[in-house]
Image (spheres, rainbow, N blue to C red):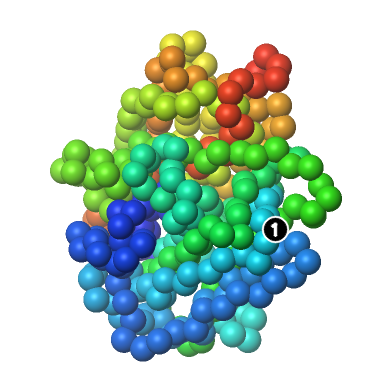
Amino acid sequence: MKTFLVALFTLVIGSSAYADGGHTHHAVPTLKKQVASSIAYGENTATLTFGPIDLPAGHSEGDMGDSMPRFNFQLPEDKYLIGFKAALSTIDGKELPRNYLHHILMINNTKPSVSCPGEPLFFGGAGLEMSETQFPDGYGVKLAKNDKLMTVVAFYHGAPPTKNVIATFTMEFAPKAKPVKEMEIYQVGVNIVCFTKFGDRPADQTDEGIEIGPGVQVRTAPLKFSMDGCVKYAYPHGHDELLMIALENKTKKQTLLRTVPDVERDGTIREFLSHQVYKDSQGFQISKADDYEMVMVYHHSLQKTEPQHGMGNYLLYMTPGTCPQENRTASAQ
């Protein structure tokens, strides 16, 4: 199926929009009828349920796919997020193709983003890859009970007619008695990932990604970090026909991340297999002083005439400062 997925790691709305809906440049499409959203708490979990909804549902803006209403919530007490997963099915439990989903974005409107100053914190979510996430033992992301949390869910507007679709997003939290080291989250990508920089992006880059020409395409982007940190987990995101994404330290001439998706014969992404998703309690070092580069490699089949847009992104979960020991090569092999 032809898929144009909105960036999992691109916040297409400014911080003021999350607070009061005032942003107009990339407005979140709204449905003509109200669709239910709810949250259910377990002992150490919280599951958000969206729907049921009939696809395609229609949308008002045309650039972001079919979207659920934004759902705002707060946790009953302080929690440390240690993992999350998404699922897509019909109301009777029939699993649906992953590429029916544009994205589930998890946003903390109270805590500012480190990587995108002036924007709210994007602390997790899911796109086409729907990778199940489990941070290294003893590490987590703090979500305080007073934090104003929000989720934005969008479905692919080209999905075939499907009745009673349900999307779920389950957050796993550390038990109360378990000590947890807090991590920061940092967005990096070949495509621009910060809303405040959208005005500077090239003409061939849109909300759907970077325009991919026929054959093999290699795209890179320079990167400077605004903090020193020790990366413990890296959540990858890409689109169909992706061959690889990578993060490299150009100053020290090190490949830190090298991530290859599992794909169908035609290049449609199945998933990022667990051994290709970086997870290490020792971590690897990133530094404000060094120069970095993001890399993505795509192959757009010559016989396909429809346009393709690519993305190569990571959500880096890191502890501030330096790694406790000399870092090892972090490449996923």
Mark 1 lies on residue:
172
Q: Residue at x 40, y 31 (%)?
A: 295
Q: Residue at x 54, y 73 (%)?
A: 167
- Placement of 230 over or under 267, stated as above or below: above
Considering every residue shown, the one lying at the far right of the view is: 177
Q: Quadrant of the C terminus?
A: top right
Q: Is residue 226 visible?
A: yes
Q: Residue at x 64, y 81 (%)?
A: 93
The percent position of residue 184, horizontal first and vertical second, equals 55, 39
- Placement of 6 over or under 322, stated as above or below: below
Q: Residue at x 31, y 86 (%)?
A: 32
Q: In which image quadrant can residue 288 be found?
A: top left
Relative placement, left or right, of 157 versus 36 is left
Considering every residue shown, the one lying at the far top of the view is: 252
Q: Is residue 100 visible?
A: no
Q: What residue type is disc 1 on?
A: Glu
Element under disc 1: strand
Task: Using the image as rendered, state which of residue 126 and residue 146 is in the foreground.
Answer: 146
Q: Quadrant of the N terminus?
A: bottom left
